[in-house]
Amino acid sequence: MRLPAALLAAVVALSALAGCSSDEPARPGVVTVGLQEPGTLLPADVDDQAGRLVTGALWTPLADYDPVTGKLTPRAAASITSPDRVTWTVKLRPGLTFHDGTPVTAKSYVDTWRAIAGENWKTTPVLTKSLRAKQITAPDPTTIRLVLDRPSSQVPAWLSAPGLVPMPASVLASRDWNAFAGHPVGDGPFRLADGWAPGTGGTLVRVTPAEGKATEVDLHVGDPVEQYDAVRDGSLDLVTSVAGDRHEAMHTDFPDRHTTWPLPEAGYLVFPTGDPRFADAAVRHAFALAIDRAALEAGPLAHQVDPARALLPPADAPGERTGTCRPCTFDAAAAKSLLAQSGFTGPTTVYFDPGSGTWTRPLASGLASALGVPVTAAQRPNGQASGPSTVDVKPASASPADLLSALASAAGYTDEGFRQDLAAAEAAGSAAEAGQLYRVAENQLLRDLPVAPLWTGHGHAVWSPRLHDVRASAFSGIDLAGLSV
């Protein structure tokens, strides 16, 4: 007998939580986790939270890099060093292997990076635009040597990018990236049993047992609202995203079993600085002051972001923040007065990319109301847009150099002093010195304001009482390998 379509869909939805029913006892060492569908599991092309969660369990990066302190924590690498910030040496830990049993060598990295550089993946610019190594070689199985075209202090941050993990020789030979994304083979604490089933999920199995830690993680793709309720009801252990209509309840439903962490994602309003209407910084500051960021966060962005408090998001911000971001403040009266003084009369259009219209349209409406000039929103045309544009930026590394350069480029901002600040920061002799110089560059962008910061992304998670040691970081999200049960 064939089930009606609606009933069949309900059965499929319920089966997504199979194996974690509240009527069944939890299996020892097995953790059930809810997540949304990853965009891909090809590590160099991942830029979404779900994809980073899974690939972060399947691979071990060379190191972890903290942009605030500049601290480098070696992982697959034993060390990353340089005598002059031009020639860099990466020493790998001995005995690394892929989940297919083949060894992870320095050549694995060199060949993988060569493949990444030849593609148009999310991590490709880290190699081709940021690192810009003249030479990358593997003089022996545990040594990677890089020679840059200039001194740079940012190499540890770039090499810690989660997309620069190695791929086995088999896929580098076949170049069947789609097949590999369905059955990824990494070198991390978990392997993916039986591949990834789109719309359903997959099972992570720990490679080397660790006392008290999860031995298996069952990943279930599903609706965040339903999964949140499943954790609350005891039929799911952890959900890695919290929908907007559960955001407030999270604090009472899980008072001591929820966490929030910064994501490498931020939204900006980019001004066309070459357009005479926006050549005056006063006009750009007026628009920035007219944006009610809190209303965007609570409304169309559904509590998935924080209102921007600086130009750089926390995931890419070096050092401790000092001072305030005046252009991040909503002040409609000051905005209207400043715009009137500038002589700007409008109308203008704010352009957006596909998928960003849900929050750009309310932003444009708010600008029109606060400034008293006609402001509309439209999807960005194929040619050059004739007005400001919203952009959603997802940095691939923790280096502030990448984001600052990308933002300036998007606005056509070519100030020589800013360029010199970036060059000085990159050539700095220490992480602390580089952080101070990047702050100088950030502050210049806030003064000239070719781009206005709008929001920064954050992740949420809630979990059941049986889980402990739930931790998260910006680029990998929840540390599945660290979960205790």
Image (cartoon, rainbow, N blue to C red):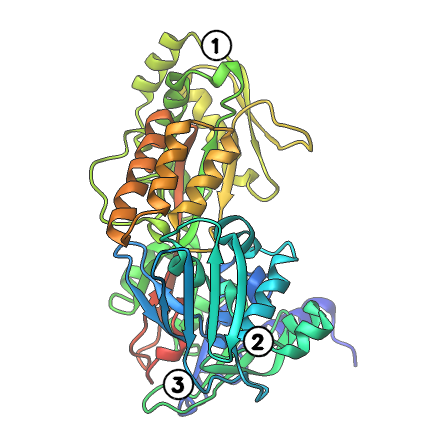
Q: CA distance from mark 3 to mark 2?
A: 20 Å
Q: CA distance from mark 3 to mark 1?
A: 61 Å
Q: Give the crowd class for mark 2: few <14, some 14-19, many >=20 residues within 10 Å.
A: some
Q: Earlier in the sequence, mark 3 or mark 1?
A: 3
Query: Residue drawn 41% across and 57% down?
Result: 155
Q: Which mark is residue 430?
A: none
Q: Which callout, 3 or 2, points to the residue nearer the camera?
A: 3
Q: Between 423 and 57, which is closer to the camera in this rendering?
A: 423
State the SS at label 2. Answer: loop
Image quadrant where one finds the N terminus: bottom right
Quadrant for residue 99, please give it: bottom right
Place of residue 445 in the rendered image (x, y in percent of width and height, measured from the top left) = 37, 31
Q: Can you identify the residue that label 2 sits on?
A: 16
Query: Residue drawn 45% across and 40% down?
Result: 405
Kindly identify the amino acid type of the residue bearing the numbered disc 2. Answer: Ala
Q: Is there any visible trace of residue 472 in the rendered image?
A: yes
Q: Can you identify the residue that label 1 sits on?
A: 345
Q: Are marks 3 and 1 in contact (CB under 8 Å)?
A: no
Image quadrant where one finds the C terminus: bottom left
Q: Give the crowd class for mark 1: few <14, some 14-19, many >=20 residues within 10 Å.
A: few
Q: Is residue 123 toward the left or the right of residue 484 in the image? A: right
State the SS at label 1. Answer: loop
Q: Which callout, 1 or 2, points to the residue nearer the camera?
A: 1
Q: Is there any visible trace of residue 76 in the rendered image?
A: no
Kindly identify the amino acid type of the residue bearing the numbered disc 1. Answer: Thr
Q: Can you identify the residue that label 3 sits on?
A: 214
